[in-house]
């Protein structure tokens, strides 16, 4: 938790949903006895923030984000990715139109000049459920991250995660894979590292969704969830974690 001066009093921030009940109980104790020595001691030990604007600049109004008001203009990369994935899903018939699918896959032609194939597999989805779940995660994670780190930096991170994860999958299994899941796992790792080591970033993923992503990752490697591009998941996860760790450095805040 942290507190911040506001025009009409103090705003109390709770970084984790798991801590809301404890925060409410503590606030009620303060209201009952604000002169308690424990609060006076805390006041003496807490430095005063002279300029809260650097933190305020990273704030996102959650109500606005959930309603989608004014946020798409701030997340152009996420919107473009979702639109392209939907268009390609329609054009390929959910991954069944072989000629177009082959044109977008990562193949050995990458090394003879067709460099776009490093990234185009993220636009391929094999089946509508595959498309649906990947787009839902991109909608949630992509918009959350892009609204906080600016679209150019977000776009560069997506390109790096996609390039490394797709290359690793091709080197391990050859062509025949596709989807946004490598990028999604990169964004998941980025959010997890930032919320743990830089809570003021405002990035947060609740416990349920965290465990869902981890469970799906493990099931994929165990082979219990059908054929999956596990190397894109793994390398995406590592790349996103490294990006999150770099972003936690004071120089990049």
Image (cartoon, rainbow, N blue to C red):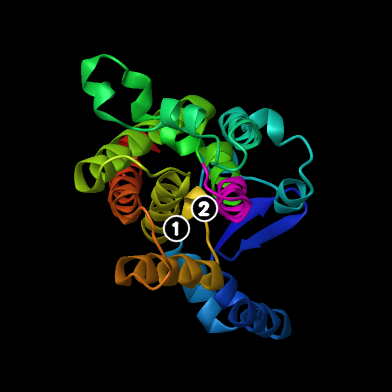
Q: Position of residue 85 (x, y in %)?
A: 58, 36
Q: Name the residue beneath numbered marker 2.
A: 203
Q: Quadrant of the C terminus?
A: top left
Residue 15 numbered tag: none
Say above or below: 23 vs 123: below
Label whose residue precedes the other's in the sequence (2 or 1): 1
Instruction: From the viewer's side, name the closer residue of 55 and 8.
Output: 55
Residue 195's disc is: 1
Q: Tell me residue 130's x, y (percent).
A: 55, 53
| Secondary structure at numbered mark 1 | helix
Question: Which residue is pictured at 52% across the width and 47% down the height?
Answer: 126
Q: Is residue 45 left or right of residue 33?
A: left
* Residue contact between numbered discs 2 and 1, judged by CB atoms under 8 Å: yes
Tell me the crowding category of disc 1: few under 14, some 14 to 19, or many 20 or more residues within 10 angstroms, Cα based. Answer: many
Instruction: Based on the picture, tell me whether residue 138 belongs to the magenta stretch.
Output: yes
**Relative to 85, is 244 above or below?**
below
**What is the count of numbered marks?**
2
- Numbered range of the magenta stretch: 125-139
In which image quadrant can residue 197 be found? bottom left
**Percent coordinates x, y for residue 41 in the rendering:** 47, 75
Residue found at x 56% / y 76%: 19
């Amino acid at each position: 938790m942290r507190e911040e001066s506001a025009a009409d009093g103090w705003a109390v921030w709770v970084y984790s949903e798991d801590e809301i009940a404890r925060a409410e109980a503590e606030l009620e104790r303060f209201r009952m006895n604000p002169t308690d020595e424990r609060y006076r001691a805390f006041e003496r030990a807490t430095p005063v923030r002279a300029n809260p604007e650097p933190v305020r600049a990273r704030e996102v109004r959650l109500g606005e984000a959930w309603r989608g008001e004014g946020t798409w203009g701030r997340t152009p990369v996420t919107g473009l990715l979702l639109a392209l994935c939907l268009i390609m899903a329609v054009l390929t018939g959910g991954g069944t139109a072989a000629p177009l699918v082959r044109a977008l896959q990562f193949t050995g032609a990458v090394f003879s000049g067709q460099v776009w194939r490093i990234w185009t597999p993220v636009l391929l989805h094999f089946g509508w459920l595959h498309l649906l779940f990947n787009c839902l995660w991109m909608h949630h994670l992509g918009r959350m991250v892009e609204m906080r780190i600016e679209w150019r930096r977000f776009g560069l991170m997506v390109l790096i995660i996609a390039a490394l994860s797709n290359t690793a999958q091709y080197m391990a299994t050859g062509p025949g894979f596709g989807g946004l899941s490598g990028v999604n796992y990169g964004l998941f790792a980025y959010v997890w590292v930032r919320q743990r080591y830089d809570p003021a970033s405002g990035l947060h993923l609740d416990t349920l969704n965290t465990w869902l992503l981890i469970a799906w990752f493990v099931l994929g490697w165990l082979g219990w969830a059908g054929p999956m591009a596990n190397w894109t998941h793994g390398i995406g996860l590592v790349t996103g974690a490294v990006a999150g760790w770099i972003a936690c450095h004071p120089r990049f805040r």
